[in-house]
Every structure is written in C-alpha cells, then in structure tokens.
Image (tube, rainbow, N blue to C red):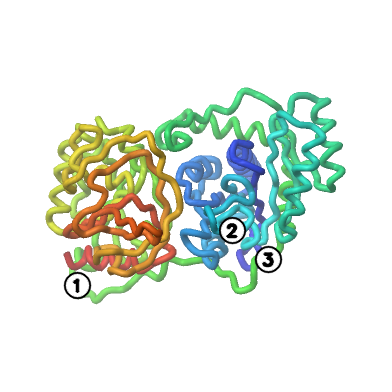
Amino acid sequence: MTSPDSGVPRLVIAAPSSGSGKTTVATGLMAALTGRGLAVSPHKVGPDYIDPGYHALATGRVGRNVDAYLCGAELVAPLFLHGARGCDIAVVEGVMGLYDGAAGEGELASTAQVAKLLRAPVVLVVDASSQSRSVAALVHGFVSWDPEVRIGGVILNKVASDRHEGLLREAVDSVGVPVLGVLRRAAPVETPSRHLGLVPVAERGSDAVDAVAAMGAQVAAGCDLEALVGLARAAGPLPGGSAPWTPGPMPTHHPSRSVKKSKPRVAVAGGAAFTFSYAEHAELLAAAGAEVVTFDPLRDEELPEGTAGLVIGGGFPEVYASELSANEGLRKSVAELALSGAPVAAECAGLLYLCRELDGLPMCGVLDASARMSERLTLGYRDAVAVSDSALAGAGTRMRGHEFHRTVVEPGAGAAPAWGMRTPERRVEGFVERGVHASYLHTHWAAEPGVARRFVERCRTS
C-alpha cells in the first residue's frame, strides 16, 4: 500500500476517439487488478456519472470524477488523492479523445490536461480493426503532439488475427512505444445503451456484475498486467504541495441545542431512477453537520422520518415515469416538505420530478411547470451565476456546471430563476421558490463547499 505523499501508482486509460474501447479496457483493468488482490482506486475524467458506477462494481470502491472544468485544475490532484487514500494503484478512465476537452477552451477538461496535472502515464487504447501499418502514424501523432503528455504504452483493440497482430506490433515498435495488450475482435461485452449513454449499474443488477467480470477476464487474458502495474509505479510523486481534499471537519455544536437543530436529517434520492450524484456531495453535507440518509422514490412511500432537507440529483425519471407517478404517497410527502419551506435541491432529473407532470403523468407538483421528452440532446459545460438567493447559493455566486438531457421543461425558468448562463444570449433557467432550488444544471459542490454548508444551515433554521 502506498501513501499519497510518496505518489500513488497510477495510470490514465485514454484513446484517440470515443468508441475505441477505453471504458471496456479501463473497467476490465480495474476488475483484473482487484481480482489479483490490489486495492484499486477508480476515477473518471469529466462529469459522467454512469461509468463510475461500473468502476465501483469492478473495484468495490466509490467511483470518483476528476473534472478540471467543474472543479478547477487546482482541485484535480487533491480530489484524486482523496479517492485514492489507502489504495495500491489508481486507474483513471479518460473522456472522448485524449486531447478533446471543453469546446473552445483548448486543453481544458481534456484527458491530456488531467494526465499532466496528475503526472500520470497514459495508456492509449487504439481501435485497430481497419488498419495495420497506419497505426504507427496514429500513435506517433498522439505521442508527439504534446511532449508533456507521457504515453507509456498502447493497447491494441479489435485485432483480427495473429497475422494482423504481428503487423500492428511491428508498426508500433517502429514508434518506440511498447504494446501492453492485444484484445481480439469478439462479441462485445453486453453493456446496453440508450438515449444518454450506458444503462446505469443500478438498473442492471446481476447483468452488470456479469458484464464487469467479462471485461476483467478479457483484459486479464489479453494485457500484460505486470507491465501495466510497473508503468503505474513509475509515475513518481505528484506535483509539490498536493494534499488530499477533505470535505472539512465535522462541526461541533453547543450541547444545549436539540438533536434536530444540531444534526438535521437530509434525505438524498437514490435507487434506479436517481443514480447521478457525486460522492463528495454526501461527504460535504455530513461534514457540514447533516445526517445523510438515502431513500428510493420507486419504493419508499414517504420521506424518511424527520427529514429537514431534500436532495434529488440526476438520473432517468423519464424511464420510470409510470412508477414514480404511481407512488402517490411519496409525491405527496415531497410536496408537503417543499411547501413547508424546507430546503430542496434538485438537479436535472430532480427538476423533472418536482414538475406538475412528466410526459403527461403526474409528478410532485411542486413547480408549476410541465416536462416532456425531446429529440434534441442538450449537452455541454456551462459557466453560470446564481440569479436569485436560495438555499444553495446567494445571488451572484458563480459556479460551473454541466447539462446533459433530452427533455424540455416549460416554462424553462420561474419568476425567480436559479441560474443565469454566462453566454452571449444570457439565458436564465431553473426555479427558486420557497426553499426549493431546481435546475437542469449539474454542479460539483467540491468547487464551492459553501453550497453544502449553506444548505445544512438552512435545514437547521427552516
């Protein structure tokens, strides 16, 4: 086991483009190393919530994101170290192509930037299905594009035959980059997708377990695990001054305060319909003094007893609209809490759940708005500023976020909008009503810890 101070052994699994197989390789590598008795810390570049669920299944540890746009470059190494505490090795899955980042922002939020911030060697997963000697030009281009990015090896994916493998190895050898694995063309591991990407682990049960096991077996059979571990161990120390992020010390309260006031209960939606959340949010709420409890809107007929605040993150309520609508008891419980003025924070799926209806089915009715599925994908990073004072943030608070949905809410903003987007059109969106803050925008509270402290304090006083 390696302490953070000496440098956690680490690898970044990247690719020239999306669809090359990096999720299969990264998840499979995590599973294969875990199967050999190593404590593996799983990480994902970017805002994605779904891949970390598969990573958690592969390693038995919480999958965590490292996102230089949402959290700032200065928090990448501290958040990484926070997740990697006590681990033998860390595997970081990249996003899109190695050098692809936030649109129009250069290398910001790219896998390459994160690799440099973590001083981590990169393993490039190349889809070799339609090439042979040309792979050398591709690998050479990625190696030479940015000398600060260290590509320590290549894994060749979708290789057709022994002869094809020989041609590819000869080509890559000419570039001077070692081949650390070869995966043959095979029936893809069953990882079904739908309108927003892979189906989350929470919805698949034993099928997800089987898929991760298959990925692990595939990587173990086709990759040089010893060489990959050796490359990770050669990463060396992290940048000087890097220390693990912490959500903050648990606060102490005067003994005369009531239990309710000193430790308010914050209910966090979970289950198959609400799978999108960053682990740091619950950690920040707990550090701010909350008792964090999880409930499942598909199964629980009322909020946990004594709930003083409610957090409803992202997910797929549109897939479970009928079940959510049929749970009238919980819908009524949520509406009563919101109408009482208690703090409620809702992101994306949570926003839809609080609407009057979703695709014609009754929801909680907290907001006088209607939601429906759309053919149009809304996707991208956002630079936002709080328009209205709320339980989450004071007006003028600036945060960065991410939108990712195929739904439309009408109207898109209330009389007191939640956020204004710092774009030429100055779009406003979301709702602030009583204690409710509801919006499409996904944010990472580690970038602004005051959000969690403010929310918990409102829970104490509401």
Instruction: Inspect the image, locate mark 1, and give the three-letter code of the amino acid beneath it.
Output: Arg
Residue pointed to by mark 3: 237
Contact check, label 3 and label 2, Cβ < 8 Å: no
Element marked by disc 1: loop
User: Given this view, does label 3 or label 1 mark the residue nearer the observer?
Assistant: 3
Q: Report whether 462 appears left or right of 204.
A: left
Q: Residue visible at 54% across and 49% down?
A: 44
Contact check, label 3 and label 1, Cβ < 8 Å: no
Q: Residue visible at 19% across and 72% down?
A: 257
Label 1 packing within 10 angstroms: few (<14), some (14-19), many (20+)? few
Task: Judge whether residue 77 can be spotted in this image.
Answer: yes
Picture coordinates of residue 391 (x, y %)? 25, 63
Instruction: Inspect the image, locate mark 2, and give the three-letter code of the amino acid beneath it.
Output: Gly
Instruction: Inspect the image, locate mark 3, and give the three-letter code of the amino acid beneath it.
Output: Pro
User: Given this view, does label 1 or label 2 mark the residue nearer the observer?
Assistant: 2
Residue pointed to by mark 2: 106
Picture coordinates of residue 346 (x, y %)? 29, 51
Residue pointed to by mark 1: 257
Which of the numbered marks, if any, corresponds to residue 449?
A: none
Q: Residue visible at 33% across and 47% down?
A: 348
Element marked by disc 3: loop
Q: Which of marks 1 and 2 is nearer the N terminus?
A: 2
Q: How far apart are marks 1 and 2 (CA)?
A: 51 Å
Report the quarter where the C terminus lies. Answer: bottom left
Q: How far apart are marks 3 and 1 (CA)?
A: 46 Å
